[in-house]
Amino acid sequence: MYPPVYSRRHLRAAFIVLWLASLVAITVGSLLPSAVDGVGSDKLMHLGAYGVLSGLTWPALEVWGGRRLLGVALALIVFGLAIELVQPSVGREFSVADAVANALGVLVGIPLGRLIRVTLRLAVPPNA
């Protein structure tokens, strides 16, 4: 028996769902009361969350280079900053260090997204 063949369209739809779930999780998690006390681990969580969001953005939105890549990266960085600016209205504190960790996560996610792209190109035939 052969394994099921997934088309690029199906995989893109899956990445869109994962991306939206990540976006919702980051938004909700950023606006709920903080459960993390450690300063270093908090920044790593910001970096990791925005790295995953950024990495999923590229295959979900099929953004691979040029101005579109820059525009989407800037939009994600602005989103991270906006979340930080909204936090004082829900009883949390604005943190420049968190905003920087968010931005660094976006930048770390770009090569992650490219790795996903290369992997998909190798694993899924163009006509599938």
Image (cartoon, rainbow, N blue to C red):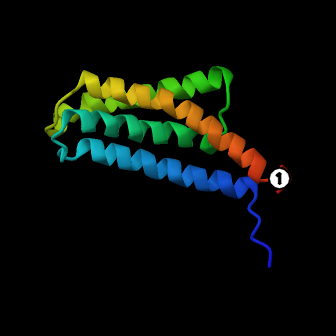
Residue drawn where x is 63% and y is 25% of the image: 68
Task: Give the percent coordinates (x, y) of residue 32.
Answer: 22, 47
Does dot 1 land on a helix, a strand or a loop?
loop
So how many labels did they put on this image? 1
- When the figure is inspected, residue 34 is found, relative to residue 74, above or below; the finding is below
Q: Is residue 62 left or right of residue 25?
A: right
Q: Nearer the viewer, residue 118 or 61?
A: 118
Which image quadrant for residue 13? bottom right
Image quarter hosting the N terminus: bottom right
From the image, which quarter does the C terminus lie in? bottom right
Relative placement, left or right, of 38 versus 81 is left
Could you say where residue 71 lies in the image, as x and y percent from the top left? Answer: 56, 23
Taking the view exactly as shown, the residue that stands out farthest to the bottom is 1
Q: Residue 77 in the image: x percent, y percent?
A: 43, 26
Which residue is painted at 59% across and 51% down in the image? 15
Name the residue at 75% across, 52% down. 123
Residue sitting at 29 percent across and 47 percent down? 29
- Residue 64, position as x, y percentages in the image: 67, 31
Q: Nearer the viewer, residue 19 or 100?
A: 100
User: Which sits in the foreground, 90 or 63?
Assistant: 63
74 above or below 120? above
Q: Residues within 10 Å of mark 1 (few under 14, many from 20)?
A: few
> Residue beneath label 1, please?
125
Quadrant in the rendering for residue 87: top left
Residue 57 found in image quarter: top right
Which amino acid does the dot numbered 1 rest on? Pro
Q: Indicate whether 104 appears above or below 12.
A: above
| 3 to the left or right of 111 | right
Please give left or right for residue 61 compared with residue 2 in the image.
left
